[in-house]
Amino acid sequence: MHHDNKGFGTRCIHAGQQPDPTTGAIMTPVYQTSTYVQKSPGVVIEDYDYARSANPTRKALEANLASLEGGRHGIMFASGLASLAGCIHLLSSGDHVLLCDDVYGGTYRSLDKVFKQFGITYTRVDMLDLDATEAAFTPKTKLVWIETPTNPLLKVVDIAAVARIGKARGAIVCVDNTFATPVLQNPLSLGADIVSHSCTKYIGGHSDVIGGVLITNSDELGERLHYIQNAVGAISAPWDCFLLLRSTKTLHVRVQRHCENAAKIADFLAQQSQIERVIYPGRTDHPQHEIAKKQMRGGYGGMITATLKGGLPAARNFLERVQLFSLAESLGGVESLIEHPAIMTHASIDKPLREALGISDGLVRFSVGIEDVDDLIADIAEALG
Ligand SMILES: *Cc1c(COP(=O)(O)O)cnc(C)c1O
């Protein structure tokens, strides 16, 4: 049964899945197999010959995630960074990549420390500045990598505007949609060629699996990415795909609660005298609130960044005192996390660049979970007090 014309929540639960044909099991089984028996040489069932190339659990998840992004092809990888690598494998030595300046640290590290060795160059540019973005293109720019909202400063890049510039220059435009999730933002409908997710975050949502996916509407890119998935081999395991299929069934409900809780907490933080600044795309004082309103729907996500007055000592004190918020890297799980970007997630960026980007020592990042919001607010109040 096709579900592409159904509502988002229905697709979360049903897209890509059908009862198991051999038993009627309603849940897609974990096809924990490395190979498939052939009736005669080359005579295989569907396209199942070897499990790096195709696996039914993975295929169901790929179809499910593709549907949620409004795409035709989903290609699963072992992690979000493996999906970035999958995208980079579309390029050749000598090609150039344009990146957001505030991109996920691991994305930057991959390009700077690994792919540079293969002659793939990159430029980081502030994509809020469309003139600067346009000026950063070179004749060799083949890929534009947008991330929005960004991490940890929650800058909101105008996807449609940057995609227009990228497409006019003949580049592939990819959006890392990890923070927004397909619930709130569908980059393919805004002109992007490819959407990338770290499924480790909101799509997984339970802090128990690592995964990545690329989604596209282009048959040509879909075919090349499936080829890369098999040829390079950074595939997602059947058990991980099963966990992610379980997760997407509640994605819409979880993200809705993440958004509601985060909006309330952002407003609470903004009223506290110990807080210098709150960054949340849903607040009207966010500098790109209008862009966020235009390209996101139904909410502004579960991430909040705030600067404490008093710099590192104040931030350290606060982070040691919170109880319900766990001090940990990562984000997007049902449980609330909090972290200190300058010391934790963004420590690999040297201090001058960090300061230039605005990642100060008083900055803390909240991944607001789906607990009772009153308990979360009480925890913050207590730790600030
Ligand atoms: C975590 C993250 C990644 C990398 O994903 P992994 O699954 O950890 O490899 C990429 N982009 C963003 C925005 C992330 O938050």
Image (cartoon, rainbow, N blue to C red):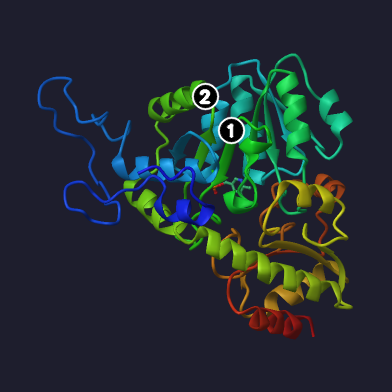
| First of labels 2, 1 by sequence position | 1
Could you tell me which residue is drawn at 73 percent across and 68 percent down?
263
Within 8 Å of ligand 1, the CB of disc 1?
no
Q: Secondary structure at mark 1?
A: strand
User: Which label is found at residue 221?
Assistant: 2
Provide residue 155's location: percent of width, then percent of height. 79, 49
On screen, residue 140 versus residue 269, left or right, reads left
Q: Amino acid at mark 1?
A: Ile
Q: Compared with residue 337, is residue 212 higher up or lower down, i.e. above or below?
A: above
Provide residue 244's location: percent of width, then percent of height. 42, 53
Within 8 Å of ligand 1, the CB of disc 2?
no
Provide residue 13's location: percent of width, then percent of height. 42, 56
Q: Amino acid at mark 2?
A: Leu
User: Which label is found at residue 194?
Assistant: 1
Could you tell me which residue is drawn at 55 percent across and 22 percent down?
90
Could you tell me which residue is drawn at 42 percent across and 24 percent down?
227
In this view of the protein, can residue 347 be seen by the observer?
A: yes
Provide residue 229's location: percent of width, then percent of height. 42, 30
Which is nearer the eye, 206 or 255? Answer: 255
Q: Residues within 10 Å of mark 2 (few under 14, many from 20)?
A: some
Could you tell me which residue is drawn at 73 percent across and 82 percent down?
383
Query: Which quadrant, please, contains the C terminus?
Result: bottom right
Query: Which quadrant, please, contains the N terminus?
Result: top left
Residue farthest to the left, as pictured = 39
In this view of the protein, can residue 363 be seen by the observer?
A: no
Q: Residues within 10 Å of mark 1 (few under 14, many from 20)?
A: many
Number of numbered discs? 2
On screen, residue 216 versus residue 343, left or right, reads left
Which is nearer the eye, 90 or 341? Answer: 90
- Would you say the residues marked 2 and 1 are in contact, meaning their CB atoms lie under 8 Å apart? yes
